[in-house]
Image (tube, coloured by chain):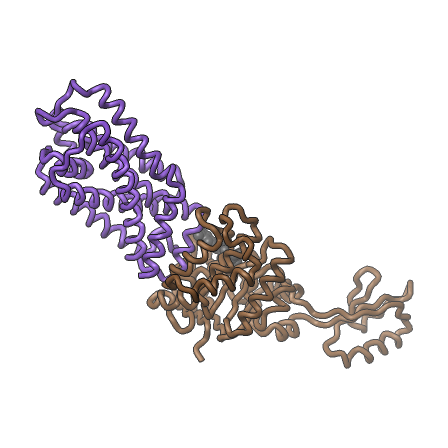
């Protein structure tokens, strides 16, 4: 099966700044893929290159097997992009905006088109606002319309550039419910976000971008396993202290002990008891993407 | 075809929704020019020997309105969507650069012609309308709208900010239109300024347009149509090339 996205050795330079540095990436059809990285890492530039808004200095990009430059019309039909910036056309109502956007993709007015527009409006809780002018909408509502605009031509590949930045919890939930459904129906989803819990719960695979390079690329569970560990958090009787041969880190009055598998917990507790310490409180903590992210971003020359 | 028609529809809807500003206001402006100039000059000036000044002025004002509004439509639409960022909505879909150009130009023509027709309708009341040759009138109206619409696209593509566009308008478009013989026949100018006027393409648009009304003009309408057509084709070629390259649209 052809990959949904194929990015090969893509480089882009702005003056002296290397915004993308020979990026290689493939996303398979049907994936829910996360593209993470700090501000300025090059996420938006990469998405813009896919959408044909930015021309890379070198390299190739394909959407569903269509080259974004030589076969730009086919490539753009396969791709729906939700831009990061909150942009809108102040002259039109929500419904007009969507109808016009569908028309740009060559979809003429028809009962089927109207039905799909209605369905998108419904799924994004926009039905009440369908006839409101774009200018009168709140930021969150405008964001929903941007998502709706990316979907009017039923693209197989949907790219969302920080769709939940500065958006209320309710919209985040509405949005993710809808996007998950689209993914379940076979759409490929690529997402950039600052909310790492979001990426952790949604994305099957994650790429981390730093200074225009991919520095980590793996399935979400693998990343968590590789860069992050479970921990046992113990509070000891006042005055007790673990000797150096027990691998542990002291955080205030809590001792943090790493372990890999839950089978390891009992032997670990036995070792602590053997030192004569008394455990007053005990908890375990799950690995999380936040920790992985920080590790990857701060390690020098981390490899994918 | 659907994407072309949709972009055209959007461009027309854009000016139609603010029609008071984009259609009614320019008609009023032209009417004010007519009132003032005809009040001052009527009875004192005859053009081409026999023509009363007000009758002479009307076609020039109509054409000036066509030209200015065609320019304003493409240039302000482009700069607005560039500054607001909403230009991405037409950059993301598979719209060919030919459709892009065509839709903007046809919309500009429509607005230009609508304002021109409005001015003509209102001024009929001041000077009896005389139409010698409507085909020339239409030909020059369309060429003029296309030429200035194209110039507006170039300005809108080039400018990054509103004040750059305003500079383009104030230092190029305004002098070109005001010094094109809207308000006078260039035969009334000193020889030097007559010669300079002949380097102004807008002069040929106005002069040819006026020929359609009176069957009289400063230069032959064939010369005027040749100059106007060449200018339009050259600028259209340049604009299409820039759109194809994604000049200032796709980095
Ligand atoms: N048009 C541009 N001109 C100059 N520099 C740019 C331009 N667009 C992006 N950059 C720079 O490229 C880098 C990557 O930006 P971007 O792709 O927006 O990052 P991200 O989306 O990951 O925050 C940043 O340092 C940014 O300042
Ligand atoms: Mg970004």
Q: Is residue A57 visible?
A: no
Quarter of the image where one finds residue A153: bottom left
Quarter of the image where one finds residue A123: bottom right
Q: Nearer the viewer, residue B42 or A183?
A: B42
Q: Nearer the viewer, residue A15 or B55?
A: B55
Image side of residue A275 versus residue B237, left or right? right
Q: Nearer the viewer, residue B4 or A300?
A: B4
The hue used for chain B is purple
Quarter of the image where one finds residue A1: bottom left
The x and y percentages for residue B116 are: 26, 38
- From what the image shows, is residue A213 above or below residue B248? below
Q: Quadrant of the C terminus of chain B?
A: bottom left
- From what the image shows, is residue A264 above or below residue B134? below
- From what the image shows, is residue A2 above or below residue B152? below
The x and y percentages for residue B79 are: 38, 45
Q: Is residue B192 visible?
A: yes
Q: Quadrant of the N terminus of chain B?
A: bottom left
Q: Nearer the viewer, residue A195 or A185?
A: A185
Image side of residue A145 versus residue B227, left or right? right
Q: Which residue does the image show at 63% across and 68% down from the upper left?
A: A200
The x and y percentages for residue B114 are: 28, 41
The x and y percentages for residue A288 are: 68, 67
The hue used for chain A is brown
- From what the image shows, is residue A49 above or below residue B76? below
Q: How many marks?
A: 0
Q: Which residue does the image show at 79% across and 77% down from the upper left?
A: A265
């Amino acid at each position: 099966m052809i990959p949904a996205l194929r990015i090969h050795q893509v480089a882009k330079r702005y003056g002296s700044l290397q915004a993308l540095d020979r990026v290689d990436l493939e996303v398979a059809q049907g994936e829910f893929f996360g593209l993470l990285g700090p501000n300025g890492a090059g996420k938006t530039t990469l998405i813009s290159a896919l959408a044909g808004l930015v021309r890379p200095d070198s390299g190739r990009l394909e959407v569903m097997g269509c080259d974004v430059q030589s076969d730009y019309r086919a490539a753009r039909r396969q791709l729906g992009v939700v831009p990061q910036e909150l942009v809108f056309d102040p002259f039109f109502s929500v419904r007009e905006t969507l109808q016009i956007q569908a028309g740009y993709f060559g979809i003429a007015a028809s009962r089927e088109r109207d039905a799909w527009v209605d369905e998108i409006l419904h799924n994004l809780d926009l039905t009440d606002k369908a006839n409101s002018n774009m200018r009168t909408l709140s930021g969150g509502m405008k964001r929903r319309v941007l998502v709706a605009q990316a979907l009017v031509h039923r693209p197989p590949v949907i790219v969302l550039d920080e769709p939940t930045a500065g958006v209320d919890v309710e919209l985040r939930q509405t949005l993710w419910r809808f996007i998950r459904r689209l993914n379940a129906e076979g759409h490929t989803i690529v997402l950039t976000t600052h909310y790492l819990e979001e990426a952790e719960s949604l994305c099957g695979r994650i790429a981390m971008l730093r200074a225009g390079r991919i520095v980590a690329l793996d399935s979400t569970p693998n990343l968590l396993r590789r860069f992050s560990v479970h921990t046992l958090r113990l509070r000891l009787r006042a005055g007790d202290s673990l000797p150096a041969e027990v691998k542990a880190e002291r955080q205030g009055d809590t001792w943090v002990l790493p372990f890999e598998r839950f089978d390891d917990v009992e032997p670990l507790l036995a070792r602590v008891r053997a030192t004569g310490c008394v455990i007053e409180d005990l908890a375990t903590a799950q690995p999380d993407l936040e920790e992985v992210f920080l590790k990857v971003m701060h390690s020098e020359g981390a490899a994918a | 075809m659907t994407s072309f028609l949709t972009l055209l529809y959007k461009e027309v809807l854009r000016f139609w929704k603010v029609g008071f500003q984009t259609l009614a206001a320019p008609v009023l402006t032209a009417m004010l020019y007519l009132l003032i100039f005809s009040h001052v000059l009527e009875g004192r000036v005859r053009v081409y020997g026999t023509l009363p000044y007000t009758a002479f002025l009307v076609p020039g004002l109509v054409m000036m309105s066509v030209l200015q509004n065609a320019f304003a439509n493409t240039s302000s639409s482009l700069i607005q969507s560039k500054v607001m960022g909403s230009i991405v909505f037409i950059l993301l879909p598979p719209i060919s650069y030919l459709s892009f150009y065509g839709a903007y130009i046809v919309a500009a023509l429509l607005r230009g012609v609508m304002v021109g027709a409005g001015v003509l309708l209102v001024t009929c009341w001041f000077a009896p309308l005389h139409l010698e040759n409507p085909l020339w009138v239409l030909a020059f109206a369309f060429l003029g709208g296309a030429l200035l619409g194209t110039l507006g696209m170039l300005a809108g593509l080039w400018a990054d900010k509103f004040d750059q566009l305003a500079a383009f308008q104030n230092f190029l478009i305004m002098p070109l239109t005001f010094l094109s013989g809207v308000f006078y026949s260039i035969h009334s100018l000193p020889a030097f300024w007559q010669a300079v006027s002949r380097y102004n393409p807008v002069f040929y648009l106005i002069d040819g347009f006026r020929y359609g009304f009176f069957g009289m003009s400063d230069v032959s309408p064939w010369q005027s149509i040749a100059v106007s057509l060449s200018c339009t084709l050259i600028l259209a070629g340049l604009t299409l090339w820039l759109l194809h390259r994604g000049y200032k649209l796709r980095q």
